[in-house]
Amino acid sequence: MTSTKYLTANVDGFKIFYREAGPADAPTLLLLHGFPSAGHMFRDLIPLLADRFHIVAPDLPGFGQSDMPGRDKFTYTFDNIAGVIERFTEVIDLKRFALYVFDYGAPTGFRLAMRHPERIAGIISQNGNAYEEGLSDGWNPIRAYWQDPSKENRDALRAFLAPEATHWQYTHGVSNEAMVSPDGRSLDDFYLARPGAAEVQLDLFGDYKSNVALYPAFQSYFRTHRPPFLAVWGKNDPFFLPPGAEAFKRDIPDADVRFFDTGHFALETHAVEIAAAICDFMSR
């Protein structure tokens, strides 16, 4: 058995909470979560990997147990989130690591990879997109806000923050909903209900357009550096479509792309299978 430690790092005055497990001298995996979750989304995956890898799973700024300063003190953009996580890796002395990126973790992690390609041992993308063909029509209300950041369009996105929306994200595309624990989504709802959290999340919905604008730069990084790459994709994801996973092979021809019969939060139902794929990938 391996144990998980629950720690905090002081990143230039910013408290970042993180989970850590596995031998410190083993290959490191940096796990980056997505919306609307936190590092707890890896609770089933970490024990399956910690016997052979050094696992670090931070909560992104504004998420989970990490600091969520007011919007007058911190501007919630993906550039700024990536900057804090970049400094976090330096503060806890991660020299070289593989990235596991999911949802928001993808544009965060891909920024880190572009800035410091020498630190990246490989990339595992679980429904973490970098191609326009991977974006479904489910993004249309958010696209409308990108084009016209009016109060009306911003308020229309508040429905994405409701418990019903979280439940749908966790269960859509899952063949057996009884396989999805309510614990994860209930914790996400708790974090979303904190004072100020809704405005933070709406700011990030608006700034997601910066990630799409960076897709060509991400793709150039893939072509130039050819990091070892594994895509493990819930094929029934209503937001990030299978063509987005397949597109990685355009820029990294030897990328390993695997689909699983599940939805957006693939680890809720397929943690064992995804852990096996990671172990196979990392061994190569």
Image: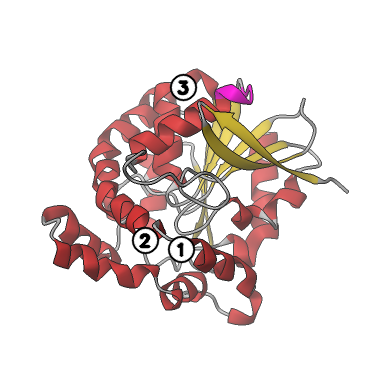
Q: Is residue 57 above or below residue 26?
A: below
Three-letter amino acid code at the position of disc 2: Ala
The reply to whether the C-beta atoms of the residues labelled 1 and 3 are less than 8 Å apart is no
Residue 93 counted in the magenta span: yes
Residue 117, numbered circle: 3
- The spot of residue 205 in percent (x, y) is 30, 55
Which marked residue is nearer to the observer: mark 2 or mark 3? 2
Give x and y (percent) for residue 182: 61, 74
Determine crowd level at label 3: few under 14, some 14-19, many 20+ residues with C-alpha closer than 10 A.
Answer: some
Circles 2 and 1 in contact, beta carbons < 8 Å: yes
Determine which residue is flagged by label 2.
Answer: 198
**Taking 115 as reference, is 231 left or right?**
right
Asked whether the residues under the numbered discs 2 and 3 touch, taking CB atoms below 8 Å apart as contact, a structural biologist would say no
Q: CA distance from mark 2 to mark 3?
A: 34 Å
Q: Amino acid at mark 1?
A: Leu
Q: From which residue to which does the magenta span run? A: 90-94
User: Mostly what secondary structure, the magenta segment?
Assistant: loop
